[in-house]
Image: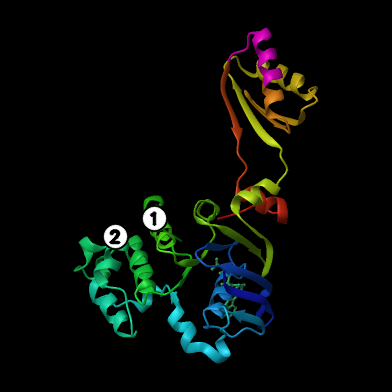
């Protein structure tokens, strides 16, 4: 079931075309991730969907509902992660949650939310004493307090250390277990790959592509990168490079010192031929790896640009 449909969204700020033309739909229970580099238009897109910014053009439908006619019903249906500045620093997480709960006719029990965001042990500490990761978890809790069906999280892990980031991932996966729909923005490819049912890659206010992480990677060329490092030094790497360049399965090869990189459409054949050669020559191979393709490669392949976090 489609819970959100966005068609031809556009928004400019003066001469800056923040969102040029964005269309997608989100299904119930999905983690749908909008990913793109800085300034790609992620926040502007999210804020238009959340009803905080008015689009210049385009339609936003939550099922049968739209912002012009059904704002109150939509507000009951969605939860938006507040900015840190919207929390009360001198209150505790529990007090913040209770305060936010009082804004709604119905809410989820505070204890349950504290447990979900793993802040039960910090329930009575003042927010100003919390770490960045704990504050972000509280922000997700505040988005959840009204028990919405659809939750919007705008870069919830930006600036957090890897452990704090993983703690947020656990919460997002738990939201999915609860049957919630999550719309997330991030500029971390790894995060998008790990959490998302579908990923929408945006760049310069336009959609580059939308699909499941696996399907996007599958769409890439089947070429794989093999890396070999030799214990016997440069001579062995050089000879193997010359040999590999004559193999039909190898598209190209690059060598740096004792390390050799090969790109092949048939990794099994290439490895078989390579090891036959190195065994005959009695070269000692120190390391072998085959690199898996990632969403980062998808971005590079679609835009021709390097990905920068
Ligand atoms: P980031 O990852 O840096 O948050 P983003 O993908 O969320 O980037 P947006 O914040 O949507 O991108 O910004 C898209 C473009 O619109 C940027 O060039 C930004 O400077 C510009 N922009 C966004 N909001 C405004 C505003 N209120 N006034 C003027 N320009 C804006």
Q: Residue visible at 28% across and 81% down?
A: 99
- Residue bounds of the magenta highlight: 272-284
- Give 154 or 89, whichever is nearer the viewer: 154
Q: Residue at x 55, y 63 (%)?
A: 32
**Residue at 54% across, 59% down:** 187
Location of the N terminus (image quadrant): bottom right
Q: Where in the image, quadrant-wise, is ligand 1 located?
A: bottom right
Q: Position of residue 156 (x, y in %)?
A: 44, 64
Q: How many marks?
A: 2
x then y, percent, for residue 230: 60, 19
Which of the 4 quarters of the picture holds residue 201? bottom right
Q: In the picture, residue 285 is in which quadrant?
A: top right
The image shows residue 268 at horizontal and vertical percentages of 68, 26
* Mark-to-mark CA distance, 2 and 1: 10 Å
| Above or below 288: residue 231 | above
Q: Do the residues under discs 2 and 1 have CB atoms within 8 angstroms?
A: yes
Q: Which residue is mark 1?
A: 170
| Nearer the observer, 209 or 126 | 209
Left or right: where 169 falls relative to 234: left
In this view, the residue farthest toward the left is 124
Q: Earlier in the sequence, mark 2 or mark 1?
A: 2
Between 257 and 68, the residue placed more toward the observer is 68
Point 62% across, 69% down: residue: 25
| Dominant SS in magenta | helix
Q: Which residue is mark 2?
A: 118
Asked if residue 116 lies in the magenta stretch, the reply is: no
| Residue 93 visible in rendering | no
Q: Is residue 282 covered in magenta? A: yes
């Amino acid at each position: 079931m489609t819970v959100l449909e966005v068609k031809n969204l556009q928004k400019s700020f003066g001469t800056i075309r923040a969102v040029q033309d964005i269309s997608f739909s989100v299904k119930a229970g999905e983690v749908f991730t909008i990913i793109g580099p800085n300034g790609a238009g992620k926040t502007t897109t999210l804020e238009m969907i959340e009803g905080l910014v008015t689009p210049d053009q385009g339609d936003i439908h939550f099922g049968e509902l739209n912002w012009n006619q059904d704002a109150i019903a939509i507000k009951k249906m969605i939860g938006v992660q507040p900015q840190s500045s919207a929390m009360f620093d001198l209150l505790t997480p529990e007090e913040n949650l209770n305060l936010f709960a009082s804004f709604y006719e119905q809410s989820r029990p505070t204890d349950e939310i504290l447990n979900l965001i793993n802040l039960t042990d910090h329930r009575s500490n003042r927010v100003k004493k919390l770490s960045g990761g704990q504050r972000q978890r509280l922000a997700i809790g505040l988005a959840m307090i009204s028990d919405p069906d659809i939750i919007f999280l705008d870069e919830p892990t930006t600036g957090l250390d890897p452990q704090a980031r993983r703690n947020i991932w656990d919460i997002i996966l738990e939201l999915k277990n609860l049957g919630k729909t999550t719309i997330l923005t991030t500029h971390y490819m790894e995060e998008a790959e790990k959490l998302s049912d579908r990923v929408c890659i945006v760049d310069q206010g336009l959609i580059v592509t939308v699909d499941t992480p696996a399907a996007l990677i599958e769409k890439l060329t089947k070429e794989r990168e093999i890396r070999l490092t030799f214990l016997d030094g440069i001579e062995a790497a050089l000879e193997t490079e010359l040999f590999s360049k004559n193999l039909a399965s190898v598209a190209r090869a690059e060598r740096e010192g004792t390390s050799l990189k090969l790109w092949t459409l048939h990794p099994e054949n290439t490895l078989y031929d390579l090891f036959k050669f190195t065994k005959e020559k009695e070269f000692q191979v120190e390391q072998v790896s085959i690199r898996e393709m990632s969403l980062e490669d998808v971005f590079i392949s679609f835009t021709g640009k390097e990905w920068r976090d």
